[in-house]
């Protein structure tokens, strides 16, 4: 099992939006970074743990515990000219961008960046590293356990 931190802007898809979705599952659209895409394509598996993170908001931080709920598949927003994630170079027969479905397991009180930084055991958590702007980053099992208090957090 792998663990991930996945960032979402609350105006795009908040933890509450995920809770309100059927089966609390949302497609993780709009990833437009090759490294983040490659994580989904080659390293993510159904059942992997996800720290649901709100970014670009008043109080960024981890707001939920989730799991990867699908294998990767083409992100339809890349083909929609009305979408801010439209990519005219991407073709349906050779899609450039992928997504996975993410199922929210539970909402948690926000673990803000200052709260995360205050914990020495999380000092090398990637989201806390200067200059790290990726929307998807791997989370080490020891960080997952420190944040969730569990080795698997009920994920299987």
Image: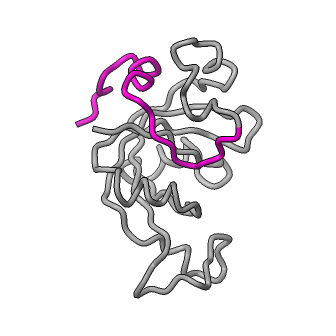
| Quadrant containing the N terminus in the rendered view | top left
Q: Is 108 located above or below residue 3 in the figure?
A: above
Q: Is 5 located above or below residue 42 in the figure?
A: above
Quadrant of the image occupied by residue 56: top right
Q: How many marks?
A: 0
- Residue 125 place in picture, x, y as percent: 54, 28
Q: Considering depth in this image, is 11 or 148 the residue closer to the camera?
A: 148
Image: magenta residue range: 131-156
Q: Considering depth in this image, is 20 or 50 the residue closer to the camera?
A: 50
- Residue 61 place in picture, x, y as percent: 63, 31
Colouring mode (rainbow / by chain / secondary structure / one colour): one colour
- Residue 152 place in picture, x, y as percent: 29, 27
Residue at x 44% of width, y 40% of height:
4
Residue 104 within the magenta-colored segment of the rendering? no
Residue at x 36% of width, y 42% of height:
67
Residue 134 within the magenta-colored segment of the rendering? yes
In-image side of 147 versus 77 (left or right): left
| Quadrant containing the C terminus in the rendered view | top left
Residue at x 65% of width, y 41% of height:
132
Residue at x 67% of width, y 26% of height:
113
In-image side of 16 versus 150 (left or right): right
Q: Residue furthest left?
A: 156
- Residue 12 place in picture, x, y as percent: 63, 55
Q: Is 35 located above or below residue 16 in the figure?
A: below
């Amino acid at each position: 099992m792998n663990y991930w931190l996945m960032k979402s802007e609350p105006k795009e898809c908040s933890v509450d939006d995920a809770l309100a979705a059927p089966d609390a599952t949302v497609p993780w659209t709009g990833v437009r970074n090759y490294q983040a895409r490659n994580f989904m394509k080659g390293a993510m598996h159904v059942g992997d743990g996800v720290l649901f993170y709100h970014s670009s908001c008043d109080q960024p931080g981890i707001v939920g515990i989730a799991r990867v709920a699908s294998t990767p598949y083409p992100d339809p927003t890349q083909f929609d000219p009305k979408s801010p994630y439209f990519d005219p170079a991407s073709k349906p027969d050779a899609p450039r961008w992928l997504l996975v479905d993410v199922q929210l397991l539970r909402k948690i009180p926000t673990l803000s960046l200052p709260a995360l930084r205050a914990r020495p055991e999380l000092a090398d958590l990637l989201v806390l590293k200067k200059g790290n702007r990726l929307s998807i980053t791997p989370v080490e099992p020891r960080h997952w356990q420190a944040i969730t208090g569990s080795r698997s957090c009920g994920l299987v």
